[in-house]
Amino acid sequence: MGCAISGLAAKAEFGERNTEDAAVAAAYPREDQIQMIKESWKVIRDDIAKVGIIMFVRLFETHPECKDVFFLFRDVEDLERLRSSRELRAHGLRVMSFIEKSVARLDQLERLEALALELGKSHYHYNAPPKYYSYVGAEFICAVQPILKERWTAELEEAWKTMFQYVTSLMKQGYQEESSRQRHLALSPKERPDKRNTAL
């Protein structure tokens, strides 16, 4: 453990909200923060598989309830077995790929928003509730600090936090939109609101 924002601190640091507040978007990173994130990513991307594994092992250490979302890891108690899991490595790489795409799209707000909203919608179908999203950002930050060594600063940490808060707020919004859409689809045609009769 040993990371100040890991575990319970993640809730406060990453501004965890109820899912009802998901539509309230977090602040977008400033231009100087975007540049810091992009520069640090150049170093981080050389170790993305390692960061992905560290991030998820730490996530399962600090928040064991998160394993319930992952069918393959639900019953695995041995963290060493997790560290060598091909499935965990593959999932870590998928998450790191999303982070890489997010970093690349920091200058393209519409594309970043579409990416994060879509990921939130897909997480609805994975039964991965929004309450876990902020934990991933906290564990990512803890995993990259040793890789960046003296390059890591309080300002860089704040930049990454801002990006993760922004992206996770959009993911939560996407999750809520998909949840609402699925509830609407589940209604029988008689129960659905008739859009033709809404105007007075």
Image (cartoon, rainbow, N blue to C red):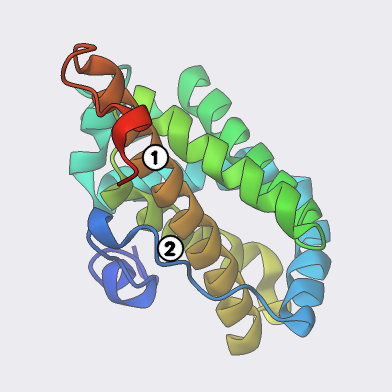
**Does 31 sit above or below residue 50?**
below
Residue to which mark 1 is pinned:
177
Residue sitting farthest toward the bottom: 154
Residue to which mark 2 is pinned:
138
At horizontal 27% and vertical 51% (from top left) the residue drawn is 131
In the picture provided, is 162 more to the left or to the right than 77? right
Whether residue 126 is visible here, answered yes or no, is no
Which element type, helix, strand or loop, lies under badge 1? helix
At horizontal 50% and vertical 53% (from top left) the residue drawn is 170
Q: Position of residue 119 (x, y in %)?
A: 52, 36
Alpha carbon separation for disc pair 1 and 2: 25 Å
Are the two marked residues, 1 and 2, in contact with CB atoms closer than 8 angstroms?
Answer: no
Q: Position of residue 195 (x, y in %)?
A: 35, 31
Q: Earlier in the sequence, mark 1 or mark 2?
A: 2
- For marks 1 and 2, give the one nearer the viewer: 1
At horizontal 52% and vertical 28% (from top left) the residue drawn is 91
Relative depth, front residue between 191 and 98: 191
Which element type, helix, strand or loop, lies under badge 2? helix
Q: Position of residue 73 (x, y in %)?
A: 30, 24
**Does 69 sit above or below residue 15?**
above
Label 2 sits on what residue type? Answer: Ala
Label 1 sits on what residue type? Answer: Glu
Neighbourhood count class around disc 2 (C-alpha, 10 Å): few under 14, some 14–19, many 20 upward: many
At horizontal 38% and vertical 29% (from top left) the residue drawn is 82
Residue 162 occupies quadrant: bottom right
Quadrant for the N terminus in the image: bottom left
**Does 164 sit above or below residue 79?**
below
